[in-house]
Amino acid sequence: MDKILITGNGPLQGEVSVAGAKNAALPIIAASMLSADPLHISNVPGVRDINTVLQLMSLLGATVERSGTDLSIDCAKVSSVHVPYEHVKTIRASILLLGPLLARFGEADVSLPGGCAIGTRPVNEHIAGLEAMGADIQIEGGYIKAKADRLCGAHFTLDVPSVTATENLLMAAALADGVTKLENCALEPEIADLTGLLTSMGAIISGAGTGTITIEGVKQLHGATHKVPPDRIETGTFLAAAAATRGDIRVLNTNPDFLHHVLGKLEQAGARLQLGPDWIQIDTGGKRCQAVNIHTAPHPAFPTDMQAQFMALNAVAEGSSTVVENIFENRFMHVAELQRMGADIELQGHTAIVQGRERLQGAPVMATDLRASASLIIAALAADGETTIDRVYHLDRGYANIDTKLADLGAKITRV
């Protein structure tokens, strides 16, 4: 099993390019099931979650061709609607195949999803929305078994603005009979991106990027070409790493519009930012950042996927801070590992109280989930001595070559 060794050695400096967004690419790949025509996708990140879902697509009968960051998927000869547990136990995005399979083939047999153990992420919103469209759904033996001769348009309001539920229902409604109106939709930029893809495939959709999306179902969708947008969380991770190490870096191939709240917190911490159309420059002036309070909430507020990285930043910042996790009840597993490195963090329910320290100390630690992995890397970069991070397969689920990218910024980091 791979481990990552890091020796803290001062500020990160230089330029780094981010990959395409995993969380945008996964629903795009699922959307290919909606058509018998090929879907051509560029800027696809080379991460484990993408590899897993592509293996699953091939298992179902899709023809998958991949060259670097370019991908072609042809679902004309899909022969199965059974999504087995063995192929999805490590990835939650498997649930995104439920809506497309049901809408196009009239049935779906999808294992309940896996993924990071960061808390309860129920599928009830997906099921309730599809049932509102006329689906007959049973849960048996850990599988969601759904049938519908053809889905029908419906008016459905999500109890919570779930990203994957919004995506799933949006895809299903694209092939439903009649008009579907979805309310309290998630506002993450990945939703607008998926809507853009579906529109290019022939879907009729209005309200993209808002809480209310209206979809006029069509009988069939056609192929399309689409570019995956840049990964806003990878962007934020590099920016937080630069801030924690008192560095000066430029992040390329990104979109500053996706990160307003995160950028605001970095400026509040004392970092100087410059923004271009597809780049962000962060310069700390070699100074220690100020601690900042964090409250996670659905987009456009502070993203839960950046909470762990800012916890590491606050651990070496000047002053005290509170970090409140409002999305997942079990997303503080990285705290115990940061404490092993000397971080002064006290947990009170879903709030962490952090007293910043001048430096942390290297130590053997263990990654517990995807974003926790990133927080430990940031902490190790800002620590004295050597840190060994175990179970980095979590990291590989969502970050493409982050160790080599950090090495190019001057970090002493190796994978063993």
Image (tube, rainbow, N blue to C red):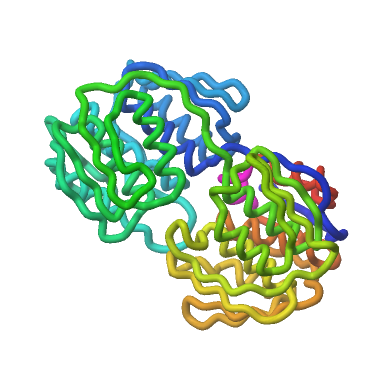
Image height of 79 relative to 28, above or below: above
Q: Position of residue 300 (x, y in %)?
A: 46, 57
Q: Quadrant of residue 334?
A: bottom right
* Frontmost residue, 90 versus 335: 335
Report if residue 276 lies within the magenta region: no
Using residue 90 as the reference point, say whether residue 223 is left or right of it.
left
* Frontmost residue, 141 versus 375: 375
Q: Quadrant of residue 193?
A: top left
Image height of 8 relative to 194, above or below: below
Using residue 67 as the reference point, say whether residue 356 is left or right of it.
right
Q: Position of residue 34 (x, y in %)?
A: 31, 27
Using residue 373 as the reference point, say whether residue 165 is left or right of it.
left
The magenta-colored residue range is 392-399
Residue that appears at 38% across and 33% down:
30
Residue that appears at 45% across and 35% down:
53
Residue 391 in view of the camera: no
